[in-house]
Image (cartoon, grey):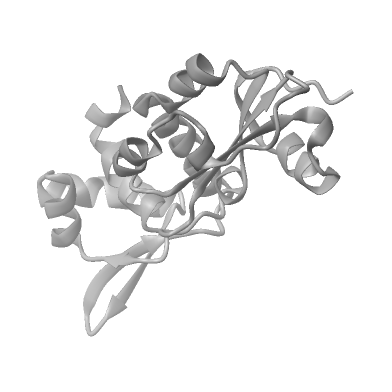
Amino acid sequence: MLENNNRYKLLKVFLENPLDSFRLRELSRIVKISPPSVMAYLKEFDNEELVIKFEKRGIPFYKANRENEKFIVYKKISIIYEIYSCGIVNEIWDKLAPQAIILYGSHVKGEAIDDSDIDMFAITNNKNVKRMDNKAMDIDLKKYEELLNKEIHLMTDNVKNIPNELKNNLVNGVVLKGYFKVF
């Protein structure tokens, strides 16, 4: 749905590369949109303060405005959309049958940078389940890592075994599927 939206395609470049600066023509090549259209979107982004325009040797550059609240919200929504679209949530749900699948960490805070990994936790009701990491599960994370262009860190455990510090992170995370019952 959103992939066909040129505005989102352009904004996604900044969402996925928040530390990088881009020239107009460079952005045009990346998103395969004409320079005049890219310029129109960049003006909108500049007016909304989603990007910061600056000049280097007389050449205009654009970079993400990582301090802008709206940019942070878009960043959060974008990663949730990408995670759902790639199919990993349904595969985790089908193979592990967890109580809840939670996204937590830097992506939920909107602080993720280019090399940030995706932290996910599958909470199980099964008291016999010991903590499992990526290698112990029958899920091919590599294909999803390639689709998302991010390393995925997936853990699972019974809610009673989760340390309090991690529980705080999970409570402040985003439930992608299911229900996280703390009490």
Please tell me whether residue 65 is drawn above or below residue 138 in the rendered image: below
* Residue at point 50%, 23% (across, down): 92
Left/right placement of residue 34 relative to residue 55 reads left
**In which quadrant is the C terminus drawn?**
top right
Please tell me whether residue 19 is drawn above or below residue 170 in the rendered image: below
Q: Nearer the viewer, residue 183 or 61?
A: 183
Please tell me whether residue 46 is drawn above or below residue 70 in the rendered image: below
Would you identify the image quadrant in which residue 12 lies? top left
* Residue at point 74%, 24% (across, down): 128
Please tell me whether residue 80 is drawn above or below residue 42 in the rendered image: above
Image label count: 0
Q: Nearer the viewer, residue 170 or 3?
A: 170
The percent coordinates of residue 47 (x first, y second) are 41, 51
**In which quadrant is the N terminus drawn?**
top left
The percent coordinates of residue 115 (x first, y second) are 43, 59
Left/right placement of residue 182 relative to residue 128 reads right
Would you identify the image quadrant in which residue 62 lies? bottom left
Pick out the residue farthest to the right: 183
* Residue at point 23%, 36% (across, down): 6
The percent coordinates of residue 114 (x first, y second) are 41, 59
* Residue at point 65%, 22% (across, down): 100
The percent coordinates of residue 35 (x first, y second) are 12, 52
